[in-house]
Image: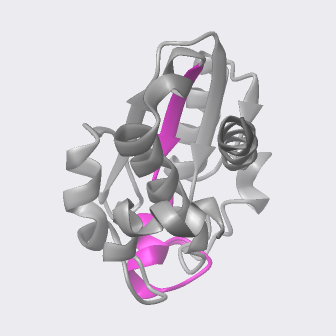
Amino acid sequence: MNAFLDIQPQLDAKTITGRQITLQSILTLIQQFGAKQIGVSVEKRPIHEIVMGSGPIKILLWSQMHGNESTSTKAIFDCLSYLHKIDNSLLSLLNLKIIPILNPDGANVYSRENHNNIDLNRDSVNLSQPESILLRELYNDFKPDFKNYILIFLMITVRDVKLAF
């Protein structure tokens, strides 16, 4: 049987249901992982960061840059749960900074854009929105080796190698 399917019932993201994921719907999870507020959105909703690991490989992850795209939020919490409950050995290799919802205003109304009708992905050059500025500042300060989806690949690869032996 698939090793991931065997451990999936132990992961927390299954508690997040539906297509629309808001800050309120993940509040318990982000608190569980020690999230701290690092900024606010246009509508003054908090933007949180989760920090995990002490390793040399810096990875910056963010989800819901488009408020209506929540699949990666679920995946992030599956990965965090895996690291926390199943195999924390990767945390000695990784230094993770994670923003679970970059666009809480868009998430709240299930919209791609933020409250000012700006697509934050398209704002990465102009930096006219507080969410875009926050992400750029975090990126510049942290200087990640990798960003976004590489964590999922790393976890699956390392886990599968471990399970094969």
Q: Quadrant of the N terminus?
A: bottom right
Residues 83 and 76: in front is 83
> Picture coordinates of residue 123 (x, y %)?
72, 55
Does the segment drawn in magenta span residue 88? no
Q: Which residues are magenta?
A: 94-116
Establish if 103 lies above or below 40. Answer: below
> Is residue 111 inside the magenta stretch?
yes
- Judging from the image, the colouring scheme is one colour
Above/below status of 58 relative to 34? above
Identify the residue at image location x=66%, y=61%: 120
Q: Is residue 160 above or below residue 38?
A: below
Image coordinates of residue 111 in percent, x first then y, are: 55, 84
Q: Nearest the camera: 8 or 150?
A: 8
Residue 136: horizontal and vertical position, in percent? 64, 35
140 on left or right of 79: right
Q: Nearer the viewer, residue 60 or 16?
A: 16
